[in-house]
């Protein structure tokens, strides 16, 4: 997904202007949004650190901060990064709108900004994420596949992500493009801060409103919320769980898929996303071109034609656990198949 910069042969920035002439000894500021979702600390941070080291021949430094889901904290972290004179910022925004002012301050300080995973507003220089509408389509299609000819026999509940995350809107749009006209949405929620406990409360409300016998499937935008949803279903006495979707291939989510509690998750290969972010960040810090890295351009509410790298997602079900997260080295069989899941793992051919 990421293309070597050596082919560019020019120390110019993404618009072709003369570059900064910086060497490999650069400082990359990395701001991630929260630590409730396992992926950020387990995958994104170490992968970006590894890739920055690769693209700077071990001389670059990553300065890291996590906002713990607080937009004001993240804005202050940007100011701290500016004060510390980082050469480039990679920002995964808590709130894509709220971060715009901080992005502008970074830009005024001469610091390029790469929006990571979420399309931040403001004068960003580049963006990398997954094809988010396609993620929603993958989830919606998987739910319809699970329901088969029973898709019209009841109602589904849609548990979308937080309205402060522009990705959530894209996931929702993609899912609706598949589900609308083929299934009936009985209740739909935008889940505050993506929190599993909020998804749990929303699901409890949906069960009360619709009745547990009428809910035939649940669209959950990510794995954390899927866990809260499944807990609510079990607490309501639902023994034959409806298919529930997810996203991120978190370990707990993969284990629920193996056990049959969760129907699927969207596995997103974080390595190419992290590699693209690191390569673009290093190039921008050095004033080099990035047009050899990008695969398309996207528009944000405040910027048009942002150079971007978008990575496709993969539907993970029981059938392809081994060929995805295990073969890619994300998890080992031992990590997935703990004592609680040993029998379920053996049933689908997963053995240590």
Image: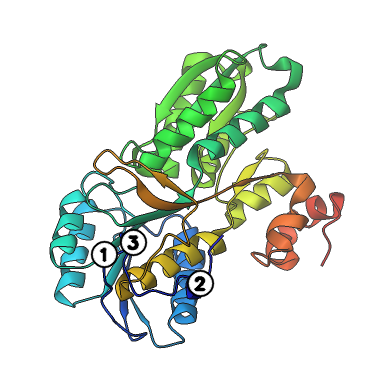
Q: Who is closer to the viewer here, 338 or 67?
A: 67
- Residue 219 position, x and y percent, is 55, 30
Name the residue carrying label 1. 112
Viewer-side label of 1, 3: 3
Up the image or down, 316 lies above or below 159; here it is below
The C terminus is located in which quarter?
bottom right
**Cα separation between marks 1 and 2:** 22 Å
Q: Which mark is residue 296?
A: none
Does dot 1 land on a helix, a strand or a loop? Answer: loop
Crowd tier of the residue under label 2, counting other residues whose Cα lies within 10 Å: few below 14, some 14–19, many 20 or above: few
CA–CA distance in space, label 1 to label 3: 11 Å
Residue 29 appearing in the image: no
Residue 215 quadrant: top right
Q: Residues within 10 Å of mark 3 (few under 14, many from 20)?
A: many
The residue indicated by pointer 3 is: 14
Q: Earlier in the sequence, mark 1 or mark 2?
A: 2
The answer for how far apart the CA atoms under marks 2 and 3 are is 14 Å
Q: Is residue 122 visible?
A: yes
Task: Reply above or below: 121 against 31.
Answer: above
22 w.r.t. 89: above or below:
below
Q: Which mark is residue 7?
A: 2
- What residue lies at 61% left-to-right and 57% top-to-bottom? 251
Q: Residue at x 14, y 74 (%)?
A: 83
Q: Nearer the viewer, mark 1 or mark 2?
A: 2
């Amino acid at each position: 997904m990421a293309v070597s910069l050596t082919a560019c042969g020019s120390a110019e920035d993404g618009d072709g202007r003369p570059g900064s002439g910086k060497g490999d000894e650069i400082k990359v500021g990395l701001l991630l949004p929260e630590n409730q979702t396992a992926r950020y600390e387990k995958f994104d941070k170490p992968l970006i650190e590894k890739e920055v080291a690769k693209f700077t021949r071990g001389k670059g430094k990553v300065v890291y901060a996590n906002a713990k889901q607080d937009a004001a904290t993240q804005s202050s972290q940007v100011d701290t990064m500016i004060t510390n004179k980082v050469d480039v910022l990679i920002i995964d925004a808590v709130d894509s709108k709220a971060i715009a002012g901080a992005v502008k301050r970074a830009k005024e300080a001469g610091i390029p900004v790469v929006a990571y995973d979420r399309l931040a507003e403001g004068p960003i220089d580049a963006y990398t994420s997954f094809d988010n509408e396609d993620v929603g389509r993958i989830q919606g299609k998987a739910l319809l596949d699970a329901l088969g000819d029973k898709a019209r026999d009841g109602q589904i509940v849609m548990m979308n992500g937080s309205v402060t995350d522009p990705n959530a809107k894209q996931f929702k749009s993609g899912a609706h493009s598949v589900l609308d006209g083929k299934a009936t949405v009985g209740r739909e929620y935008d889940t505050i801060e993506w929190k599993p406990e909020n998804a749990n409360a929303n699901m409890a409300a949906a069960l009360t409103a619709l009745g547990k016998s009428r809910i035939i499937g649940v669209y959950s935008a990510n794995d954390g919320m899927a866990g809260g949803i499944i807990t609510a279903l079990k607490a309501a006495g639902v023994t034959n769980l409806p298919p529930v979707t997810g996203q991120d291939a978190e370990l707990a989510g993969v284990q629920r898929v193996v056990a049959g509690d969760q129907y699927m998750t969207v596995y997103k290969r974080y390595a190419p996303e992290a590699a693209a972010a690191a390569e673009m960040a290093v190039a921008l810090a050095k004033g080099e071109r990035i047009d050899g890295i990008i695969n398309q351009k996207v528009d944000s509410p405040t910027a048009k034609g942002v150079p971007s790298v978008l990575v496709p997602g993969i539907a993970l079900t029981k059938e392809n656990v081994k060929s995805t997260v295990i073969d890619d080295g994300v998890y080992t069989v031992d990590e997935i198949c703990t004592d609680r899941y040993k029998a379920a793992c053996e049933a689908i051919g997963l053995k240590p």
